[in-house]
Image (spheres, rainbow, N blue to C red):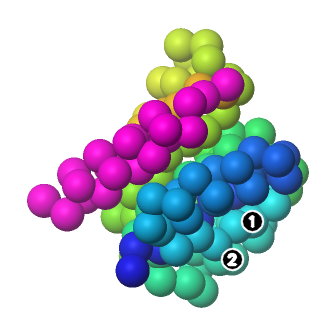
C-alpha cells in the first residue's frame, strides 16, 4: 500500500487531507510539526510527503531540504501545501526540491489528483 506523510500544524487541515487521501486508498501517517515530520520520514517507509510550509520547529522548506540531503529520502516526492502564494514562495518551494506546490485554500479533490500525478511521475 502507498504510504503518504501529511505534515501540517493545523489539525483540521491535517485531518481533512488524511481523510481524503485515506478515502483514495492511501495509508496516511501524520505529523503536527516539522521536527515530527522529519523524524517520521527517517523512520517510516514513505512514498510521498505533503508538507505545510509554515510549521513550528522546522518549516516545510527546512524538512524538504533535509530530506533531499539524506540518501534514504533524497528521492521522496514532496508536495508543499501552504497559504504562501507569492511567486517567490513558490519558487523557493521548487528550489528546495518540492515536486509540486498547492496553495491554500485548496480543493481536496485536486490535492488527491496531484498526489496521484506526482506518484505516477515518480514511478517512471
From where the camera sits, is residue 73 visible?
no
Residue at mark 1: 31
Above/below status of 118 relative to 49: above
Q: Residues within 10 Å of mark 1 (few under 14, many from 20)?
A: many
- Tell whether 33 sits left or right of 120: right
SS at badge 1: strand
Which of the 4 quarters of the picture holds residue 75? bottom left
Foreground pick, 17 / 61 = 17
Which of the 4 quarters of the picture holds residue 44? bottom right
Above/below status of 28 relative to 52: below
Badge 1 vs badge 2, beta-carbon distance below 8 Å? yes
From where the camera sits, is residue 28 visible?
yes
Residue at mark 2: 39
Q: Which residues are magenta?
A: 105-124
Distance of mark 1 from mark 2, alpha carbons? 9 Å
* Residue found farthest to the top: 87
Task: Please state the horizontal and vertical placement of residue 115, each as a whole percent of the image.
Answer: 41, 50
Amino acid at each position: 500500500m502507498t504510504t503518504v506523510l501529511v505534515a501540517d500544524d493545523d489539525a483540521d487541515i491535517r485531518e481533512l487531507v488524511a481523510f481524503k487521501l485515506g478515502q483514495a486508498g492511501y495509508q496516511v501517517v501524520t505529523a503536527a510539526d516539522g521536527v515530527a515530520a522529519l523524524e517520521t520520514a527517517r523512520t517510516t517507509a514513505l512514498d510521498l510527503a505533503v508538507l505545510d510550509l509554515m510549521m513550528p520547529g522546522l518549516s516545510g522548506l527546512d524538512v524538504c531540504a533535509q530530506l533531499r540531503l539524506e540518501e534514504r529520502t533524497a528521492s521522496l516526492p514532496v508536495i508543499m501545501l501552504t497559504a504562501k502564494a507569492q511567486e517567490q514562495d513558490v519558487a523557493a518551494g521548487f528550489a528546495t526540491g518540492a515536486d509540486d506546490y498547492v496553495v491554500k485554500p485548496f480543493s481536496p479533490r485536486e490535492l488527491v489528483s496531484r498526489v496521484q500525478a506526482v506518484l505516477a511521475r515518480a514511478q517512471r
